[in-house]
Image (cartoon, rainbow, N blue to C red):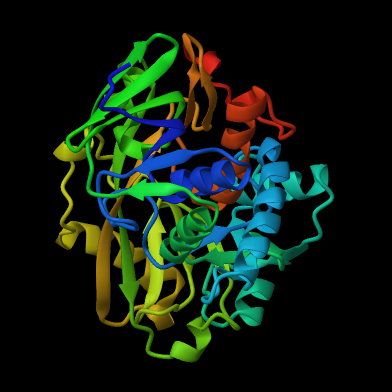
């Protein structure tokens, strides 16, 4: 071990949504932990920004996510109690689409039934009447769940970082990891600013995880996403008390959105926006006219009262796995490297519980949370 290395119990690589939560939980449980972030804390280069991120209990992706979603909501509520700005906004969630076996609507309803989540099953007409900003096809059906809503991602990261500080954590921003080396039972992390020696490393580096851990590069694919904010001509229909967060399965694709919050405009995005993938440095950061057109067409068709002037466009990154499920657990060949990655566009809501899971794995080697479907070993 280098005599110049900073020694600690755990180094967390990447202090965004997941890494900030892991840093907090590790520090709270007594670890000497250092978090390293290559950009600012928080920043807009990855997957933990945009002023609002949906939190919904009906997990159409797989009912296996529901217990994690419930625990995440509990942890966000607890974190909210100690933070000066509201993190979670309970406005309800809607999953709407055709009444077909493989639709977002059908899978959301199944998740509710498997896990006994209270919900309302609405027709398209009922949905549009209850929430006048919506204009979905009348033959569609929707799962309305009142306990969902949205999180403020930047403030969630800030809250976890501040809580980590309260428990003695060290966090270093604007510091780029250059190498990981295994030596004498420790892991040595070399950056452009220093060297750290730790018993264990937690990797929560989002789209940069494959660069830090090349053995995962073939199962982690970065994808460019663009979000848009459009100013409604009737803003009252899109305020939080009258517009639940939504996911919508329509012929043009799978869209999602949240009500007006903090910045002007109704927010909307499309999963797998333009199917643009590549290394983070290769993906275009600046939104363009095609990005705007694609999202505006959806809003004009299904939320026409929100299709006013464009107020903002922002790029973020998804990090997708081949099966669309998370990577959670130790590296199969390096058990002192714990991984939280591949959140495939639906991970931020889980950050509060992912921090708990990663901490359990560091300190206990196991976790009571149900993560078997998400083990890293399924790919390696």
Q: In the image, what residue occupies the spot 65% across and 37% down? A: 62
Residue 215, above or below 247 = above
Query: Which residue is at 66% across, 64% downward?
Result: 77
Residue 257 x %, y %: 46, 65
Where 289 sits versus 222, above or below? below
Q: Is residue 320 left or right of residue 106?
A: left
The answer to whether residue 225 is left or right of residue 32 is: left
Q: Residue furthest front?
A: 3
Reply above or below: 261 against 30: below
* Residue 203 appearing in the image: no
Q: Residue 52: x and y, percent?
A: 45, 66
Pinpoint residue 19: horizontal percent, then vertical percent: 45, 44
Q: Is residue 214 visible?
A: yes
Image quarter hosting the N terminus: top left
**Residue 230, horizontal then vertical, whole percent:** 33, 76
Locate residue 288: give its quadrant. Answer: bottom left
Q: Nearer the viewer, residue 24 or 300?
A: 24
């Amino acid at each position: 071990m280098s005599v110049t290395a900073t020694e600690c119990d755990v180094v967390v690589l990447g202090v965004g949504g997941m890494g900030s939560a892991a840093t907090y939980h590790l520090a709270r449980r007594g670890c000497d932990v250092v978090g390293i972030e290559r950009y600012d804390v928080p920043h807009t280069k990855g997957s933990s920004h945009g002023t609002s991120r949906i939190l919904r209990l009906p997990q159409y992706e797989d009912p296996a996510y529901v217990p994690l979603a419930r625990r995440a909501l509990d942890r966000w509520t607890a974190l909210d109690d100690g933070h000066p700005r509201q993190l979670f906004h309970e406005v309800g969630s809607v999953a709407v689409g055709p009444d077909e076996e493989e639709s977002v609507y059908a899978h959301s309803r199944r998740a509710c039934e498997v896990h006994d989540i209270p919900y309302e099953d609405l027709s398209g007409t009922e949905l549009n009447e209850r929430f006048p900003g919506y204009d979905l096809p009348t033959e569609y059906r929707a799962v309305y769940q009142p306990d969902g809503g949205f999180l403020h991602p930047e403030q969630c990261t800030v809250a976890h970082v501040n809580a980590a500080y309260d428990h003695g954590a060290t966090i270093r921003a604007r510091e780029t990891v250059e190498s990981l080396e295994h030596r004498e039972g420790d892991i040595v992390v070399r950056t452009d600013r220093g060297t750290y020696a730790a018993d264990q490393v937690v990797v929560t580096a989002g789209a940069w995880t494959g660069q830090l851990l090349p053995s995962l590069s073939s199962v982690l694919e970065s994808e460019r996403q663009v979000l848009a904010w459009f100013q409604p001509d009737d803003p009252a229909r899109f305020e939080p008390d009258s517009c639940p967060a939504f996911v919508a399965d329509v012929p043009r694709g799978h869209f999602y959105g949240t009500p007006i919050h903090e910045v002007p405009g109704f927010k909307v995005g499309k999963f797998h926006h333009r199917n643009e993938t590549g290394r983070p440095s290769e993906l275009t950061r600046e939104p363009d006219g095609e990005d705007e057109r694609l999202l505006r067409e959806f809003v004009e068709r299904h939320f026409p009262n929100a299709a006013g002037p464009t107020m903002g466009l922002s790029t973020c990154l998804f990090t997708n796995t081949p099966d669309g499920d998370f990577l959670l657990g130790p590296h199969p060949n390096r058990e002192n490297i714990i991984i939280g990655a591949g959140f495939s566009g639906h991970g931020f809501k889980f950050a509060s519980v992912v921090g708990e899971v990663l901490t359990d794995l560091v300190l206990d080697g196991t976790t009571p949370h149900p993560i078997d479907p998400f083990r890293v070993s399924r790919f390696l």
